[in-house]
Image (cartoon, grey):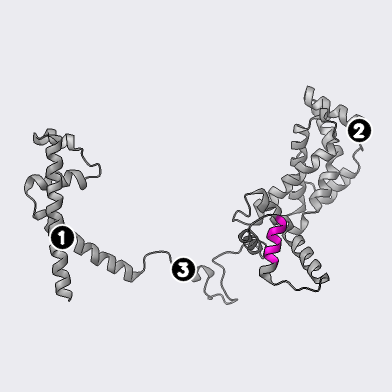
């Protein structure tokens, strides 16, 4: 049902003029749509209950969404309900449609509340729409008992009431505390004020860490070159092919090229690593002796 060009007032007036269906007519229309895909029956059923959709949409205006968009989402929920309604179950269509209308509106509100996903589970969804109400109820009950709740106590009680974790309550309080704002907004009213993005911690490598890393890498490269020089030509070839290539070669392929058995190549590789290890240990001792 396209709603472009309509205002919420005109849609409300149009919905109020729609017919009221009795149970028998409603059932007949539902059967006609389910069994015969009668679009006229579907249109008549949806039009009759648009007042219900608009009434439910108006309850979500406090979340800041345009009423026209809320009604659009409510009508989508109403159409889903009509498509999935089973008249054989003996339930009135209005009773069944309420759940679909509410779910459609809630999904829309949560999608548009923030650029960051507000909630992904049914418990978080319940928390989003009930947090303020539950907080007010718990504070009112505590006041009647002559008690005063601090923030931590209130969050604990809300978590137990809604059936979520305290972390979820804290997260949702932050999400509901205000809407999104740009990181490029200035922190003061001055045009040349610092932007909020400038206050974020830099996750990149700091200058001191970069210098230390480059220094250590240079030393390690020098040590490895010296360790490789302690090997003979065949051992250097095996180490290079086994450890310094993007796709290391297998012992079997090296054995075929060198005319050696796979086991002999493995022994030469182990001997080369042992030589390199001794060279690196000697260089390390020299460094420690120099620094001592």
In this rendered view, identify the residue nearer to me: 104 or 5: 104
Crowd tier of the residue under label 2, counting other residues whose Cα lies within 10 Å: few below 14, some 14–19, many 20 or above:
few
Q: Which residue is mark 2?
A: 23
Residue located 83% across and 42% down the image: 50
Q: Which residue is mark 1?
A: 280
Q: CA distance from mark 2 to mark 3?
A: 63 Å
Judged by its main secondary structure, the magenta piece is helix
Q: Which secondary structure, mark 1?
A: helix
Residue occupied by mark 3: 201
Q: Looking at the image, is 141 positioned above or below residue 28?
A: below
User: Which residue reaches farthest left?
Assistant: 232
The earlier-in-sequence mark between 2 and 1 is 2
What is the x, y in percent for residue 73?
73, 45
Which range of residues does the magenta coloring cover? Answer: 154-162
> Residue 79 appears in which quarter of the rendering?
top right
Looking at the rendered image, the disc whose residue lies closer to the viewer, 2 or 1, is 1
């Amino acid at each position: 049902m396209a709603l472009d060009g309509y205002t919420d007032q005109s849609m409300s007036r149009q919905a109020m003029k729609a017919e009221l269906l009795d149970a028998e007519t409603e059932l007949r229309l539902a059967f006609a749509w389910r069994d015969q895909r009668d679009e006229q029956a579907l249109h008549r059923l949806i039009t009759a209950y648009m007042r219900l959709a608009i009434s439910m949409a108006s309850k979500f205006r406090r979340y800041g969404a345009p009423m026209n968009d809320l009604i659009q989402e409510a009508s989508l929920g109403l159409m889903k309900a009509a498509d999935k309604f089973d008249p054989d179950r003996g339930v009135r269509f209005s009773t069944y449609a309420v759940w679909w209308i509410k779910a459609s509106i809630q999904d829309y509100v949560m999608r548009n509340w923030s650029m960051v996903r507000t909630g992904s589970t049914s418990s978080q969804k319940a928390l989003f729409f009930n947090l303020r109400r539950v907080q007010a109820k718990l504070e009112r009950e505590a006041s009647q008992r002559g008690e005063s709740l601090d923030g931590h106590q209130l969050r604990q009680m809300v978590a137990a009431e809604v059936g979520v974790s305290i972390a979820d309550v804290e997260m949702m309080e932050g999400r509901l505390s205000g809407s999104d704002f740009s990181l490029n907004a200035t922190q003061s009213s001055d045009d040349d004020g610092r932007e909020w993005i400038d206050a974020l911690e830099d996750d990149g490598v700091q200058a001191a860490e970069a210098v230390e890393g480059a220094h250590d890498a240079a030393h390690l490269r020098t040590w490895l070159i010296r360790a490789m020089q302690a090997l003979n030509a065949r051992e250097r070839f095996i180490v290079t092919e086994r450890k310094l290539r993007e796709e290391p070669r297998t012992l079997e392929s090296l054995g075929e090229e060198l005319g050696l058995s796979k086991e002999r190549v493995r022994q030469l590789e182990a001997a080369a690593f042992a030589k390199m290890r001794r060279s690196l240990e000697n260089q390390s001792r020299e460094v420690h002796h120099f620094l001592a």
